[in-house]
Image (cartoon, rainbow, N blue to C red):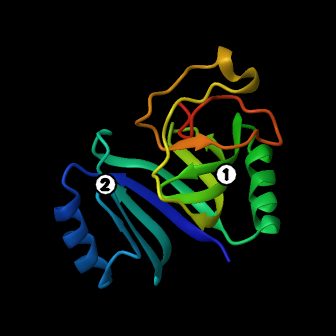
Amino acid sequence: MKRFHVHVAVDDLATAVRFYSTLFAAEPTVLKPDYAKWMLDDPRMNFAISARGAAVGVEHLGIQVEDEAELHEVYDRLVAADRPVLEEGHTTCCYAQSEKSWVTDPAGIPWEVFRSYGASAVYGGGEIAEGGRNAQPRFPASVCCTSESKPERPATRACCTPAA
């Protein structure tokens, strides 16, 4: 079953955690010094916040899937939407091991489609400079993710949040 994902950048994590914990009537399922996540069932959502220096507000939206079949199903929809797709592959992002792809919608909002399969002790970050990506823009360590292996499909950008 799929889960809607929202990631919001905040400037004061403690204040935001208190607010969202009250709003959702639940404590975060993951709480780190710079990140918190609620895995909610009503509404079915993965809601994450982070205080990592990004502009305050919605960073990106997404669809989290539970297995490979759902990942491929939603990936095929991204391709059918006729927008450039970044196939990021296996990454460390937001204290999780994931496989993901990215697309920017016509309004310029980044969307990720991902499957998480394990926890990570680190948030992610760093510059991506593997393979044929050297000609692509390089992103600082403050961005969300790093690739741990080459994607199976060619990437069109070198960052987990594609530019509009």
The residue located at (73%, 33%) in the rendering is 155
Residue 31 versus residue 55: which sits nearer the camera?
31
Residue 7 versus residue 78: which sits nearer the camera?
7
Provide residue 144's location: percent of width, then percent of height: 48, 44
> Does residue 9 lie above or below 42 as drawn?
above
Provide residue 82's location: percent of width, then percent of height: 75, 38
Determine whether, in the image, residue 15 is placed left or right of residue 34.
left
Determine whether, in the image, residue 160 is placed left or right of residue 74.
left
**Residue at the disc numbered 1:** 100
Q: Residue furthest front?
A: 121
Provide residue 66's location: percent of width, then percent of height: 69, 72
Q: Which mark is residue 34?
A: 2
The residue located at (53%, 51%) in the rendering is 93
The image quadrant where one finds the N terminus is: bottom right
Tell me the kind of residue under disc 2: Asp
Residue 48 versus residue 140: which sits nearer the camera?
140
The residue located at (42%, 55%) in the rendering is 7
